[in-house]
């Protein structure tokens, strides 16, 4: 797809819907690749990065597959499938290269504002789970991306790694853990706000908050007519662009359906809400410094994998446990209860019904989660922190996630738990659907989008050279190259203040 280089208030080259980590990443890549490009960004809330990208709304953990057990399922033959974990770990290192580039260019001056070193730990209990974790550890050792991972089923080791989790635990209980001391905590809200602040200073970029995209239609000249409403004044405007990206989190699906592109027909969404227990006792917060992930309950969605999570939010160390899942008809935290019913179409009704029929366990799980009492939530926390006290914790709503439902020849419809790019055949419109591990792999996702929607420029010598400057590993595999992996971790760690000898934040 060719890019129009003319500059006009009503005819930008690119329109981005939603001001989260995906749009921030895509806008910055486009401006670095083609500085003269004009971009308009529309966000329905009053602030950028305030929905799914915000640290309190789940996107703040730095998924890198070091500790998330749902990325390494055990197969029927007993072996461990590691391909997804390796792919995510590699994508995260690609993202680190991009962030290091932004810091080196002085686009973001304080890397500690969005990224810190926090150990990533997997913790399990029970003989079967201990055996699984040991197999997982052995399987991951084959990739240099997991070099440095430690395994232990010695309670003394585990007590050093995560004292609050081992205090008060039955000494006869079978437990085990793995640790990656080089894990990161990433505040994607802070990162996105930093990128948008820089973008606003660049010529040809405008960010419009409190503006909602109401309609999308492709005209005969192939330009997309985007109807936008100013939610403060009530004024409406029309913008015409050659390329539109819908990166509106849970709000992407309704807009994709409104676009009318054939590729979007048949897609549906299953919204899941979440809640956190937030620790309010500073002494407890200071005694835990790790991201500790367990195994998800049978039938639960990946976003509900229980974890006791240290995060740096607004310069302060925080401790969260959860998330607790629930059912909602909203596609966004600040959305409408009509989001789900209004997304129903003749083309996606059957896939949604069939996917629902195949996920009865998930439905039961969500119902049970909704009906939980404070004592029920405390009991879930005590599985990971035996001495937890209810008075130290406060319940807080997290973000919404819309899991992708798509057509499937065998089942009629399937529920997907990853992210998916849906684009028009002419490459003039693309939407990102789905959730985890989205934010951590945003750079790799946007590279795929650029290749699909801007193929001619993507493969040009100019763009290829720029890609290599921004992401030194571009075009190379990191997962099977020990020297490259080590070099990238060292160099990006130096720029981002994540050197192995650095202390974790307090």
Image: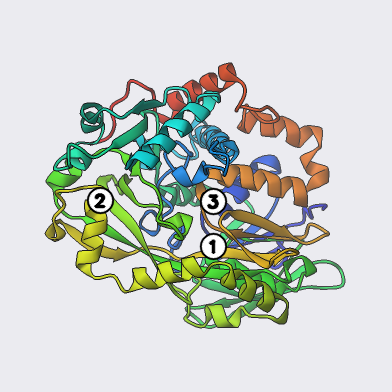
Q: Earlier in the sequence, mark 3 or mark 2?
A: 2
User: Residue 262, image x and y in percent?
Assistant: 79, 69
Which quadrant of the figure contains the C terminus? top left
Q: Quadrant of residue 340?
A: bottom right
User: Label 1 near label 2: C-beta < 8 Å?
Assistant: no
Q: Quadrant of residue 350?
A: bottom right
Q: Residue at x 22, y 58 (%)?
A: 379
User: Label 2 near label 3: C-beta < 8 Å?
Assistant: no
Q: Residue at x 87, y 72 (%)?
A: 220
Q: Nearer the viewer, residue 280 or 33?
A: 280
Q: Earlier in the sequence, mark 2 or mark 1?
A: 1
- Return the residue at label 3: 438
User: Residue 14, image x and y in percent?
Assistant: 69, 58
User: Residue 39, image x and y in percent?
Assistant: 65, 57
- Return the residue at label 1: 249
Q: Answer whether residue 119 is visible to the viewer in this image.
A: no
Q: Nearer the viewer, mark 2 or mark 1?
A: 2
Between the C-alphas of marks 3 and 1, the distance is: 10 Å
437 vs 173: above or below:
below
- Return the residue at label 2: 383
Q: Give SS at disc 1.
A: helix
Q: Give SS at disc 2.
A: loop
Q: Residues within 10 Å of mark 2 (few under 14, many from 20)?
A: some
Between the C-alphas of marks 3 and 2, the distance is: 28 Å
């Amino acid at each position: 797809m060719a890019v129009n280089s003319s500059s006009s208030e009503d005819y930008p080259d690119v329109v981005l819907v939603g001001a989260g980590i995906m749009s921030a990443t895509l806008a910055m890549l486009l401006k670095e690749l083609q500085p003269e490009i004009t971009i308009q960004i529309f966000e329905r809330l009053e602030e950028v990065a305030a929905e799914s990208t915000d640290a309190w709304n789940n996107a703040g953990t730095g998924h890198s597959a070091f500790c998330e057990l749902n990325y390494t399922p055990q197969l029927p033959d007993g072996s461990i499938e590691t391909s997804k974990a390796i792919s995510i770990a590699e994508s995260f290192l690609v993202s680190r290269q991009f962030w290091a580039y932004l810091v080196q260019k002085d686009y973001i001056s304080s890397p500690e504002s969005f990224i810190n070193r926090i150990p990533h730990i997997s913790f399990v209990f029970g003989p079967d789970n201990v055996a699984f974790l040991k197999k997982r550890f052995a399987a991951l050792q084959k990739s240099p991306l997991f070099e440095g991972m430690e395994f232990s089923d010695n309670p003394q080791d585990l007590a050093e790694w995560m004292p609050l989790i081992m205090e008060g635990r039955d000494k006869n209980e079978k437990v085990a853990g793995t640790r990656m001391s080089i894990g990161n905590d990433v505040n994607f809200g802070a990162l996105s706000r930093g990128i948008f602040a820089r973008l606003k200073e660049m010529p040809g970029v405008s960010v419009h908050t409190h503006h909602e995209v109401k309609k999308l239609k492709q005209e005969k000249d192939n330009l997309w007519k985007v109807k936008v409403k100013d939610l403060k004044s009530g004024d409406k405007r029309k913008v015409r662009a050659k390329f539109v990206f819908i990166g509106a989190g849970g709000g992407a699906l309704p807009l994709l359906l409104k676009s009318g592109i054939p590729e979007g027909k048949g897609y549906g969404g299953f919204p899941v809400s979440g809640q956190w227990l937030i620790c309010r006792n500073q002494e407890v917060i200071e005694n835990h410094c790790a991201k500790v992930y367990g195994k998800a309950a049978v039938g639960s969605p990946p976003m509900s994998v229980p974890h006791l999570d240290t995060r740096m939010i607004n310069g302060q160390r925080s401790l969260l446990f959860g998330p607790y899942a629930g059912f909602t008809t909203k596609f966004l935290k600040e959305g409408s209860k009509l989001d789900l019913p209004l997304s129903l179409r003749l083309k996606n009704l059957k896939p949604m019904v069939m996917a629902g029929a195949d996920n009865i366990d998930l439905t039961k799980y969500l119902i049970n989660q909704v009906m939980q009492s404070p004592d029920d939530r405390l009991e879930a926390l005590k599985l990971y922190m035996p001495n937890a006290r209810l008075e130290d914790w406060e319940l807080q709503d997290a973000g919404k996630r819309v899991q992708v439902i798509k057509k499937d020849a065998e089942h009629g419809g399937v529920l997907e738990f990853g992210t998916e790019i849906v684009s028009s055949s002419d490459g003039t419109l693309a939407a990102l659907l789905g959730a985890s591990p989205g934010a951590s792999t945003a750079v790799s996702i946007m590279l795929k989008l650029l290749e699909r929607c801007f193929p001619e420029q993507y493969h040009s010598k100019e763009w290829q050279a720029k890609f290599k400057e921004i992401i030194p590993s571009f075009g190379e595999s990191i997962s099977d190259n020990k020297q490259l992996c080590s070099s990238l971790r060292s160099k990006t760690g130096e720029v981002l203040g994540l050197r192995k000898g650095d202390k974790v934040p307090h």
